[in-house]
Amino acid sequence: MILHDPAVARLRQIYRPASGRLWLAAVLGALALGCSVGLIAASAWLISRAWEQPPILFLQVAVVSVRAFGIGRGVFRYAERLVSHQAAFRSLVDLRVALYERLIPLAPAGLPAFKRGDLLRRMVDDVEAMSDLSLRVMLPIFSAILVGTGSVILCAWLLPTAGAVMAVMLLLGGIAVPAVIIWSSGRGQAVQAPLQAELSSEVLTALHAGPELMVLGADDDYARRIEDVDSRLTSALRKTAVGSALSSALGILIQGAAVLAMILVAVPAVRDGDLSGVNLAVLVLLPLAAYEAVAVLAPSALAAIRVRAAAGRLVEILEAQPPVHEPQAPRSGEGTTIEVRDLSAQYPTGPVAVRDVTFDLAQGRRIGLVGESGSGKSTVLNVLAAYLGYRGQAHLGAVEIADQSGDHVRRQVLWTPQIPHVFDADVAANLRMAKPDATDEELQAALDAVGLPLGLDRAVGQHGATLSGGERQRLGLARAVLAEHPVLLLDEPTEHLDPPTAAGVLATIEQVSAGRSLVVVTHRPIEWLDDHVEVRVP
């Protein structure tokens, strides 16, 4: 059963605070379905009894019952939807928080284990799919069991053979129809989420790499690649649609057969005096209302498959091992001296990225890491910023970085990537990422310090589309000026820049790093640095 699936059971721990509301919603849902069954039964009895033209007082209880069941069905259904959705949405909030708390230690070195489009699908679609666990799986099953049992008891009380007919109908509708839809559509439903994630990843790649694909003449091949994924997804959706249509048709067939069976057993019972003629209409119409309790179990079966697949993908995030583990009893180093001895490190999804690096960085000293591409220079910066685990020794303030909390390390060390991320906002908002409470005067001073003549209200566009490469680099340096960290880590700040722009950026770095410790990754020696450390390909 889906509730015993390991991945679902893991996520249900997050749902536990809302379990009380879910039980209340289940009871309200059962009452709503019970009112539907009661409305049909009371209406059928009232119409049949009224045909006999008894005194009006004989019908008052039935009249009031019809009104009560009609009002109760709407009231209980509304209350059930209100309570169940409130519980489900609160659970989704808890689930999202848990996932984001897991993503934080994974970033940035651990995130490449997930494709960008795939991770987005997991955080949006798979999380939304988990709401079906309570709304479309647990609650319908509970309501079907409760209302179905009550309907069988009512039929058996009126006529034992009618109770058997009702039980057979509900068992077929509640077990056979879901089994058919799982058999016909289960595989298609299970692969939809991975295929949708793959399609999103391929489309995002095509959008971002479109110019390169066209220049290389690979756009047609990549389009066929997307078409192949889309074709497989369409096939899966078609299988699901066919299974849903088949289950609907089978449900109507079972429901109609139950009505005919009721007629076949009830009419002779009336003739033999075993059943009151007034109750004949009740038994004939009751299957139409009672089947509503199990009709939702076929969609619930598909929802269960979808939930199981989504739960497995979300648990992969929750169980992903971060590239660096926070110490149980963190220590804090005093000062900002850095000592690295025989440092080696690797990313979770790759081989050893850097090996046997040794250097010292006294407070206020500035050095460059040089070496061939792929030698692990950027990996060293990830280690110093406490984003990646390592072997060997790496001290910050005479204490191992691995023994300090990541937050403490990053309050001392500011890491600026090769291409600083620019948010789709104005210049002021991008700068305040480094210092949220900075005044406009402070922001303008930071821009002046790096020689960036931009207005604070200047929109930078998506991914900094309105900025040149040099302006993006200077914007990242302006953040460093605002942050005032004593140690700066710069990853190839002049890469992809023309010589005049690169020279200007280097002059800015020399100015803003004065008095601070600096580690800069570079392919070429920089004359004003105190020293250069060569990093060799492992």
Image: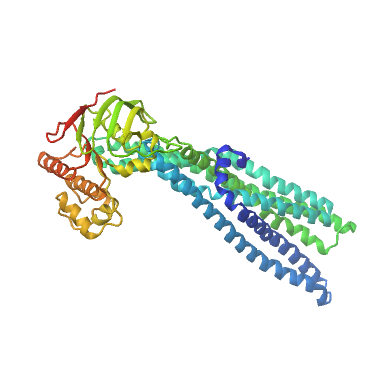
> Is residue 462 left or right of 183 when viewed as pictured?
left
Q: Residue at x 25, y 48 (%)?
A: 484
In this rendering, would 115 be left or right of 139?
A: left
Indicate the position of residue 179 as horizontal and vertical percent values: 63, 41
Horizontal relation, residue 388 to residue 282: left or right: left
Let me know if residue 374 appears in the view: no
Q: Is residue 236 left or right of residue 438?
A: right
Look at 20% across and 44% down and name the residue there: 473
Describe the colour scheme in one phrase: rainbow
- Name the residue nearer the viewer: 385 or 485: 485
* Circle count: 0
Residue 395 seen from this side: yes
Examine the rendered structure and indicate whether residue 432 appears above or below residue 489: below
Expressed as whole percent of the image width and height from the top left, the position of residue 510 reads: 15, 41
Where does the C terminus fall, quadrant-wise?
Answer: top left
Q: Position of residue 521 (x, y in %)?
A: 22, 34
Up-down relation of residue 371 to residue 450 (above or below): above
Residue lying furthest left in this view?
500
In depth, the one of 515 and 11 nearer the eye is 515
Q: Residue furthest right?
A: 273
Vertically, is 532 above or below 142?
A: above
Q: Is residue 275 above or below residue 512?
A: below
Instruction: Residue at 50%, 50% (x, y): give it.
Output: 94
* Residue extending furthest toward the front: 334
